[in-house]
């Protein structure tokens, strides 16, 4: 049992850019890197372990071999690996979309629903995202505005800045705007219902598929609730801020200048995603050098470990 450096799976969606390669050093042959799946056991893109005994194995293969105890006791309530963590580079606007809840997704799609959170890693000046509606609407009005291309008249655009946090509960209408780089922590799902796509066409030259009927069934037709802001606090050598806490994940920003101490006890695995700077992770006899863009899976039960260096990160675990 040891901390594992992960190699992500990549997606080259048409709205992506090159920042994940240029700024975060991602090694990928795609012209555009829209997403890097930094912690994933999903069938559509698995993370691969790049160090130690399990190098070359997917994270899912490791968990199958080692057993679910490496996920921690708080994960035993989930039938599958509970979360997926991404970096997303929106060079252009993403489609207006919605994700279903667990009940609907499991019944219709055969996988989890998708509640997620966004941490704005960086953004262009004046960047905005779409977050729910300006007012409550009916299903009839929602469908009519989709059909006559006036949907954006009733959706809420929100200006963003570096460090902002958005909690996207399943059923919330949303869209990442162009010029935004996001760390996304979400349920382990790839089910998305696309509602409006600016008339774009895919690689095959045809308009991308819309999922209007399903979207009308699952969308919460009201303004989104802002996630309460939290204050930073100092703990074990780091400055931490709770970004989001729900039944699926607990996420902090963690900044340190010299050294920060963590404890991966038996309750949950940890994931650390380095967003700025460098650090050396030491856990027992294991040492890992980490740089901007690196993602580490620390199995539950690894115990105390330290990160030495000046860095900014997103830290994720599963609470009970």
Image: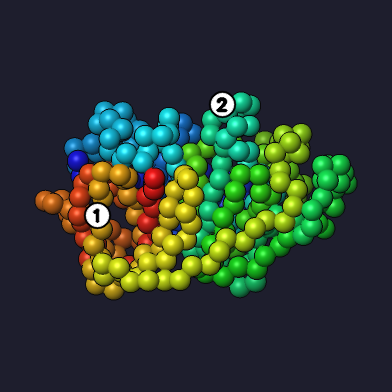
Q: Nearer the viewer, residue 52 or 23?
A: 52
Please tell me whether residue 26 is drawn above or below residue 165 in the rendered image: above
* Residue at 61% across, 44% down: 170
- Whether residue 58 sits left or right of residue 79 in the image: it is left
Q: Quadrant for residue 279, please give it.
A: bottom left
Q: Nearer the viewer, residue 90 or 112?
A: 112
> Which x, y percent locates residue 291?
31, 60
> Which x, y percent locates residue 83?
45, 42
What secondary structure is found at the residue carrying circle 1? strand
Here the colouring is rainbow
Q: Quadrant for residue 102, please give it.
A: top right
The number of numbered discs placed on residues in the rendered structure image is 2
What secondary structure is found at the residue carrying circle 2? loop
Q: Are marks 2 and 1 in contact (CB under 8 Å)?
A: no
**Is residue 294 among the parts visible in the rendering?**
no
From the image, which quarter does the N terminus lie in? top left
Residue 263, numbered label: 1
- Whether residue 255 sits left or right of residue 97 in the image: it is left
Report the residue that reaches farthest toward the left. Answer: 285
Q: Earlier in the sequence, mark 2 or mark 1?
A: 2
Q: Nearer the viewer, residue 223 or 99?
A: 223
From the image, which quarter does the C terminus lie in? top left
Image depth: mark 2 or mark 1 in front? 1
> Which x, y percent locates residue 112?
53, 34
* Residue at 33% across, 71% down: 234
Please tell me whether residue 196 is drawn above or below residue 63 in the rendered image: below
* Residue at 24% across, 72% down: 258
* Residue at 85% across, 52% down: 150
Q: Quadrant for residue 67, please give it.
A: top left
Determine the CA span between mark 2 and mark 1.
35 Å
Residue tagged by mark 2?
110
> Which x, y percent locates residue 124?
58, 69
């Amino acid at each position: 049992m040891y901390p594992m450096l992960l190699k992500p799976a990549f997606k080259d969606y048409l709205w992506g850019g090159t920042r994940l390669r240029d700024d975060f050093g991602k090694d990928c042959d795609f012209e555009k890197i829209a997403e890097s799946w930094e912690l994933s056991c999903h069938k559509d893109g698995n993370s691969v372990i790049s160090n130690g005994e399990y190098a070359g194995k997917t994270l899912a293969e490791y968990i199958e071999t080692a057993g679910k105890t490496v996920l921690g006791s708080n994960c035993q309530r989930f039938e599958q690996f509970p979360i997926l963590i991404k970096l997303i580079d929106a060079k252009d606007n993403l489609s207006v979309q919605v994700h279903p809840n667990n009940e609907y997704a499991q019944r219709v799609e055969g996988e989890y629903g998708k509640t997620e959170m966004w941490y704005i890693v960086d953004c262009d000046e004046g960047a905005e995202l779409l977050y729910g509606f300006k007012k409550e609407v009916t299903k009839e009005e929602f469908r009519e505005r989709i059909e006559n291309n006036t949907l954006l008249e009733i959706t809420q655009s929100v200006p963003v800045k570096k460090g902002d946090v958005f909690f996207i509960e399943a059923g919330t209408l949303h869209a990442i705007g162009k010029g935004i780089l996001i760390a996304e922590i979400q349920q382990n799902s790839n089910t998305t219902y696309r509602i409006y796509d600016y008339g774009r066409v895919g690689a095959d030259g045809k308009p991308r598929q819309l999922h209007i009927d399903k979207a009308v069934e699952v969308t919460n037709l009201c303004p989104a609730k802002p996630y309460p802001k939290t204050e930073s606090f100092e703990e074990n050598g780091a400055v931490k801020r709770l970004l989001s806490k729900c039944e699926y994940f607990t996420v902090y920003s963690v900044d340190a200048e010299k050294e920060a101490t963590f404890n991966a006890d038996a309750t949950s695995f940890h994931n650390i995603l380095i967003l700025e700077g460098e650090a050396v992770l030491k856990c027992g006899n294991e040492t890992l050098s980490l740089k901007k863009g690196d993602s580490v899976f620390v199995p539950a039960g690894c115990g105390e470990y330290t990160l030495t260096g000046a860095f900014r990160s997103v830290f994720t675990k599963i609470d009970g």
